[in-house]
Image (tube, rainbow, N blue to C red):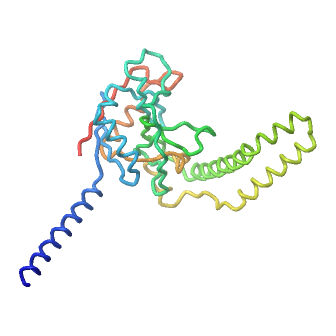
């Protein structure tokens, strides 16, 4: 009986140890290195966004990113890369439309925000992508700018106005067929009535929405190290730079053409390092 009890305790110990190790392994954040001629960017990938994390790791291990360009660079905003069409692209070609043939479901986490150095997935905007699905390969890294308190207040106002426009657009898109039929029938009076009704419905929804506010904690970061708050909750953030913010600034400061493509190609090589 004592032998059975001892065996049970040993088995229980190993099970608990194994589970503990598994939890530890899962909680560890993978790091990748993005090599450029300006230096290296060391980025940790968040576990809160597992599909984006795993996709980035997969592409990096396949060598997908090696030789691709940072094809869109806007000083004070962000640097963007990951377009497969950018590999060996001729000078002056407009880039940004390439992908690996798939998109990724949005994993927008409200606890993550666009502070300087975060890695996020690019995506197509507008009504054609209502689910905010991410590009399968294109990403951007926020450089942003340091905001004043007044600028943050203005940004809040713009964010609320943008949300109102989005709600209004949703209602009118849903009634587009009906409105077109009234236009074709030449029934202007009824068309005006329906437009007014739809606008009132949208305004009722808007009136119930709590105002968007940037928290004091985020204000502190946006007014010291910087970022770009108007992108918050619109794009999937899935990592951040832990080494190489100076390299980010160097890349963001290069000269670009009318399409925001650097005049001299900036190639990347991405490796999983931890």
Q: Nearest the camera: 129 or 141? A: 129
Q: Position of residue 157 (x, y in %)?
A: 65, 51
Q: Position of residue 15 (x, y in %)?
A: 19, 68
- For the image shown, how many numbered marks are present on the structure? 0
- Whether residue 117 sits left or right of residue 208 in the image: it is left
Residue drawn at the location 70% of the way across and 62% of the way down: 208
Q: Nearest the camera: 121 or 39? A: 121
**Quadrant into which the N terminus falls:** bottom left
Residue drawn at the location 32% of the way across and 41% of the way down: 57
Residue drawn at the location 24% of the way across and 60% of the way down: 22
Q: Position of residue 61 (x, y in %)?
A: 28, 36
Which residue reaches farthest left?
3
Q: Is residue 7 above or below residue 18?
A: below
- Whether residue 31 sits left or right of residue 72 in the image: it is left
Residue drawn at the location 34% of the way across and 47% of the way down: 45
The answer to which quarter of the image holds residue 211 is bottom right
- Whether residue 248 sits left or right of residue 259 in the image: it is left
Q: Nearest the camera: 240 or 195? A: 195
Q: Position of residue 79 (x, y in %)?
A: 44, 34
């Amino acid at each position: 009986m004592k032998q059975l009890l001892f065996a049970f305790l040993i088995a229980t110990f190993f099970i608990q140890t194994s589970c503990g190790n598994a939890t530890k392994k899962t909680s560890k954040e993978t790091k990748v290195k993005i090599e450029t001629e300006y230096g290296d960017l060391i980025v940790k990938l968040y576990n809160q966004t597992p599909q984006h994390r795993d996709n980035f790791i997969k592409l990096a291990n396949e060598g997908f990113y090696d030789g691709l360009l940072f094809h869109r660079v806007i000083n004070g905003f962000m640097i963007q890369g990951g377009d497969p069409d950018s590999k060996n692209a001729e000078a002056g070609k407009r880039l940004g439309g390439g992908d690996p043939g798939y998109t990724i479901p949005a994993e927008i986490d409200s606890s993550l925000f666009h502070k300087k150095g975060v890695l996020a997935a690019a995506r197509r905007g507008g009504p054609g992508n209502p689910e905010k699905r991410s590009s399968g390969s294109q990403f951007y890294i926020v450089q942003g700018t340091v905001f004043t308190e007044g600028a943050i207040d203005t940004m809040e106002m713009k964010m609320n106005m943008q949300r109102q426009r989005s709600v209004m657009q949703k209602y009118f898109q849903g009634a587009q067929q009906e409105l077109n039929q009234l236009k074709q029938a030449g029934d202007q009076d009824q068309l005006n009535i329906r437009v007014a009704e739809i606008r009132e419905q949208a305004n009722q929804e808007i009136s119930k929405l709590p105002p968007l506010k940037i928290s004091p904690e985020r204000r502190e970061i946006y007014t010291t190290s910087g970022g770009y708050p108007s992108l918050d909750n619109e794009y999937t953030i899935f990592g951040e730079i832990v080494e190489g913010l100076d390299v980010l600034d160097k890349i963001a400061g290069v000269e670009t053409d009318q399409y925001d493509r650097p005049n001299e190609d900036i190639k990347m090589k991405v490796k999983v390092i931890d």
